[in-house]
Amino acid sequence: MSRRRLLGTVGAAGATGLALGAAGGATVYAVGRPEPATALTSLGADSVPFHGAHQAGITTPSHARGHLIAFDLAPGAGRKEAAALLRRWSASARAMMAGEPAGGQAGGHDTGIALDAGPSSLTVTFGFGRTFFDRTDLADRRPTALDPLPAFSSDHLDAARSDGDLWIQIGADDALVAFHALRTLQKDAGTAARVRWQMNGFNRSPGATQHPMTSRNLMGQIDGTGNPKPSEPDFDRRIFVPATPAAGTPDWMAGGSYAVVRRIRMLLDDWERLPLGKQEQVIGRRKSDGAPLTGGTETTEPALDRTGSDGKLVIAANAHARISAPEANGGAAMLRRPFSFHDGIAADGTPDAGLLFVCWQADPLKGFVPVQRKLDRGDALSAFIRHEASGLFAVPGGARQGEYVGQRLLES
């Protein structure tokens, strides 16, 4: 069965004359009652192409649901097994992103989890960790940009939830579509690779606000205001490896990017005890609309030199917005595309929640590293967060028609 053969959504129930009842009784009725087929809403109908100059999931708008998963090649698996695995993964990703069952129109090995759903803007993005190149005898093809990230004083990293030979980012605007992709790719790994770690995230759903706006994180802060924009003339130079890579970057990375992945725990109990004014001083922006404390709107450039009547800087010297600003870091920029996470309550009774930080750049030594070094030395926000896991992955350019992701590396 094709996923494009769709049933009506619960959201159409209002048009059929159902009224809301006490204790949600009408909701149960709407879910259980067969409804005539209707057109899929735009939320589910949107699709993202698998093929292209760059892999999907980098400049794609943020998704409502996401999964990050890393694999290690199984003992004895090498370049041949890795190539076969990337072929399987690419074939499944191509089908699912088009709204079709994994395994083709016949369904093949598809689990049926996402039957009746559209593509829901699904993206699947693949990357290689540093250790992948040793295990496939491709160490001479490893980019120098994959050298290990430096240690930071604020790190509390769990090695079991860090790094990995292979990495996949999955995003969709429907939770079942995202889980379907996760489960399919995990099954596709077969005996060639085993899961090293997995993290699940979420964002605000498209259409949940009266107008499009930058999403908020679990601290309630608007997060992502300073992201570079595709319309900016130097965007591609900052985010993607050029068609003719520089020395130290192999040609198979042309059109690719580097993803830094960090699991950042937010100490929400401590944060929420701060009065609103103190929270805004830590960030350097108003919580209500994301505008800098020096005035304007969310997109207004902060006036970093402005002082108040007391002679002190309006945006404090250690405010997060000041320290992370590109102008404070020699122009260093990265494209942040995170997910929030909540994994229940920790043993100490505090929320195990925070940010699955994913950032993209043409060179992590010019993007993530200089900014994080500066944050590590004096960011007021550091007292309220904890970096618990980390990874760096080389994400090759998009697959051409007839190619699988990573083919130019694995068949070079």
Image: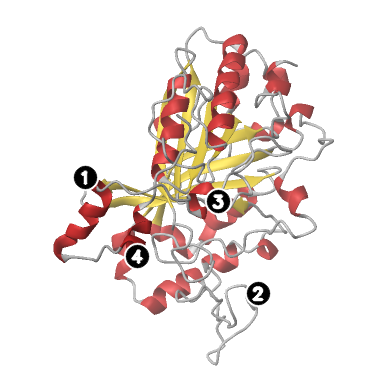
Residue at the location (58% across, 47% down)? 359
Residue at the spot 37% in from the left edge and 57% down from the top edge: 11
Q: Secondary structure at mark 3?
A: loop
Amino acid at pointer 4: Trp
Q: Residues within 10 Å of mark 4 (few under 14, many from 20)?
A: some
Q: Are marks 4 and 2 in contact (CB under 8 Å)?
A: no
Viewer-nearest of discs 4 and 2: 2
Q: Is residue 174 visible?
A: yes
Quadrant that contains the N terminus: top left
How many labels, in total?
4
The quadrant in which residue 385 appears is bottom left
Instruction: Please name the residue that numbered disc 2 is placed on.
Output: 301
In the image, farthest residue toward the top: 76
**Local crowd size for mark 3, using a 10 Å CA cut-off: few (<14), some (14–19), many (≥20):** many
Q: Position of residue 336 (x, y in %)?
A: 58, 52
Three-letter code, disc 3: Arg
Label 1 sits on what residue type? Ala
Please identify, in this view, whether the residue under mark 1 or under mark 2 is nearer the observer.
Answer: 2
Furthest-left residue in this view: 23
Q: Which residue is mark 1?
A: 347
Q: Residues within 10 Å of mark 1 (few under 14, many from 20)?
A: few
Please identify, in this view, whether the residue under mark 3 or under mark 1 is nearer the observer: 3
